[in-house]
Amino acid sequence: MLDAMVSGWEKQQRGGRRLQRETVDARTSVVRRFIEFTNEYPWHWSAAHMDEWTAQLVMEQKLAESTMRNYQGAIRMFSDFITSPYYQWPEECEARFGTHPVQICHEWNTVAHLVDYEGGPGRRPMTREECQALFDYADEQVDRAVRLKRKGALTAYRDATVLKVIYAWGLRCNEASKLDRTDWYRNPKAPELGKYGQLNVRWGKRSKGSPPKRRMVATVMPWAVEAVEDYLANARPRFGLADHPAMWVTERGGRLRPREIEERFAAYRDALGMDTDLVPHCLRHSHVTHLIEDGADAKFVQDQVGHRFASTTAIYTGVSGDFMNTTLRQHLDRGLAPADGGTA
């Protein structure tokens, strides 16, 4: 009966809701861990079991609140499935065991989702100076490997370009990893950028079981076009994988993975003595912040990074003190100006 419940829930998620296998497998794993913890069948679960499990996760495993909510969400959804009147589980359990499953996750014993962004507070936009230092250091590693005739010059060249592309086009690591060479397009409004006027992001973040969201990102930092052109002309061909579609390939012939991007970023970050909370995603935050500081329209920035809601883009924005002071001064000057346009 238990295996049939779990199997039916998996089919409901993958077949009816069209969720990805990784998502379904992760949720199923949480349910099986909860079963092991309680040592009870789902038709014997109670809210007390959830309280005990939550206490164990908090005190012993010290999980983050977002992780806790994901775990509890998996149990909540499984409980919804086995208590739903649209499926036969309540009647089957009543007939076989004289009892039936109940929902054990309630608002008083689960973590509430109160804010849009739950990343660590230390994950902030990088300053322009930090971005420049990172890119300069990445370029130095290429020059150093070439000068010392060491292996790794090609991969260092590739990774330096990846980091610049993530920042210049506001990408997530997964989006950058899955770029192909054919994803660059001309922009009739910016002919001077050639075939790099816009970037077709085909592997945007999924939402509620939907396929990856596509978006077209306009090129707004011409200096980055030079980096991409140089990489494709002088570095990419030397990997010897002319038939591979990927923009970023490895020396073993595979596609560069997000984890490898994160590891390279962390190595450079640590070498520069930057905050250890900084991750590649902070470059995406920086893209948003610096465009806003440069006067870009908020709706344009929202479309650039593929946010559904403007509030999400606002969370990504962390403008500098200088920008805030300049904006404040502009507003004060307008507010204090005489209504008739004369002198005060």
Image: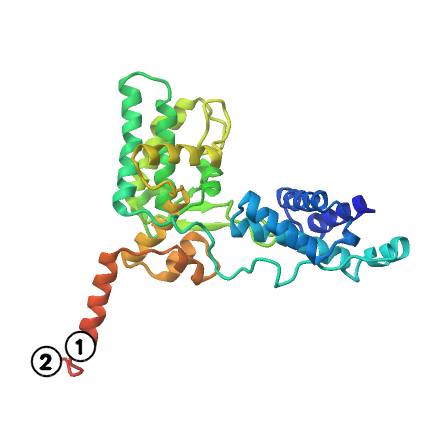
Q: Pointer 1 and pointer 2: residues touching (CB < 8 Å)?
A: yes
Name the residue: 42% across, 56% down. Answer: 303
Amino acid type, label 2: Ala
Q: Which mark is residue 344?
A: 2
- The span from disc 1 to disc 2 (Cα, nearest Å) is 9 Å
In the rendered structure, the answer to whether residue 97 lies left or right of residue 237 reads: right
Q: Residues within 10 Å of mark 2 (few under 14, many from 20)?
A: few
Name the residue: 22% across, 62% down. Answer: 325
Q: Which of the colour schemes (rainbow, by chain, secondary structure, one colour) is used?
A: rainbow
- Per the image, the residue denoted by label 1 is 336
Q: Foreground residue, 69 or 290?
A: 69
In the rendered structure, the answer to whether residue 304 lies left or right of residue 148 reads: right
- Find residue 46 and report its horizontal and vertical position in percent: 73, 56
Residue sticking out furthest to the top = 149
* Residue 193 visible here: yes
Q: Foreground residue, 288 or 115?
A: 115
Amino acid type, label 1: Leu
Q: Residues within 10 Å of mark 1 (few under 14, many from 20)?
A: few
